[in-house]
Structure formats: structure tokens, C-alpha cells
Amino acid sequence: MAKSILRDKSYSFALLVIQRHKIIVNEKKEFVISKQILRSGTAIGALIREAEFAESKKDFIHKMSIALKEANETIYWLDLLKDSEFIEYSVHKDLQVNCKELVAMLVSTIKTAKSKI
């Protein structure tokens, strides 16, 4: 596959989520919500990678749609972590901006793929 901005951005985002998860667990001793964001935040990139070898255009759209759902779920967990004061506003803002960029890219990718069916 050619160089993919979406692939690279989702991988970088997953690394940020992993780093933040470590801090939340070690410093704040929060294990439940941080595990949820770890799961959803890393699933985005995993699903994008999985879509690279989709069996069909519909399979590609399906996998990208699930990645979009995971990104939306990640925003939910980010909001909960901020509002429950497990992460600071600035950390929340940075991660949220990155995740919303992924959402926009995924929506665009899905729309483009659907238009070619």
C-alpha cells in the first residue's frame, strides 16, 4: 500500500493513547476508563490496517466504518476522563483534536469508497 496519512496518523494516535494510559494507571490509579480508551484508541489503527487487505470494497467500507465507531467511542472516553479529572484539559484537548481529525479522515474515506461502488 502507498504511504497513507490515515494509517500513519492512527498509529501515532495509538502511541499517544498508550502513553497517556500508562500515566493514568501509574499516577492516578484509574484502571477501568483508561482500559476502555486504550482499547478503543488503539483499535482505530488496527482496523485501518485490517482494511488494507479487505476482501472487497464492501469489506473495506465495513472495516473503516468500525474504525469510525471506535474513534467516536474514544472521544466519549476522553470526555469522561476529563470531566472526572483524570486528565487535564490541555491533554484532553490535544487528544480530542487528533481523534476528531481521524474521524474526519475516516468519514471522507468511507464516502469516497461508497461513491465508487
Image (tube, rainbow, N blue to C red):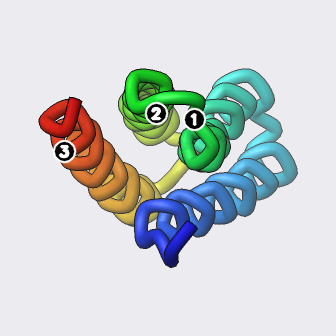
**Nearer to the camera, 111 or 21:** 111
The residue drawn where x is 58% and y is 29% is 55
Q: Mark 1 or mark 2: name the one nearer the start of the chain.
A: 1
Q: Mark 1 or mark 3: name the one nearer the start of the chain.
A: 1
Give the spatial CA distance, label 1 vs label 3. Answer: 16 Å
In-image side of 105 versus 69 (left or right): left
**Mark 3 nearby-residue class (10 Å; few <14, some 14–19, many ≥20):** few
The residue drawn where x is 48% and y is 67% is 9
**Mark 1 nearby-residue class (10 Å; few <14, some 14–19, many ≥20):** some
**Mark 2 nearby-residue class (10 Å; few <14, some 14–19, many ≥20):** many
- Residue 112 numbered tag: 3
In-image side of 95 versus 24 (left or right): left
- Image position of 88 with respect to 110: above or below: below
Q: Is disc 1 placed on a helix, strand or loop?
A: loop
Which amino acid lies under the numbered mark 3 shown in the image of this protein?
A: Thr
Which amino acid lies under the numbered mark 2 shown in the image of this protein?
A: Phe
Q: Which residue is most to the right?
A: 26
Image quadrant assignment for residue 28: top right
Q: Is disc 3 placed on a helix, strand or loop?
A: helix
In-image side of 99 versus 24 (left or right): left
The residue drawn where x is 40% and y is 23% is 58
x, y percent for residue 106: 32, 45
Give the spatial CA distance, label 3 vs label 2. Answer: 11 Å
Give the spatial CA distance, label 1 vs label 2. Answer: 5 Å
In the rendered image, which residue does mark 2 sit on? 60
Marks 1 and 2: CB-CB under 8 Å? yes
- Residue 54 numbered tag: 1
The residue drawn where x is 43% and y is 37% is 71
Which amino acid lies under the numbered mark 1 shown in the image of this protein?
A: Ala
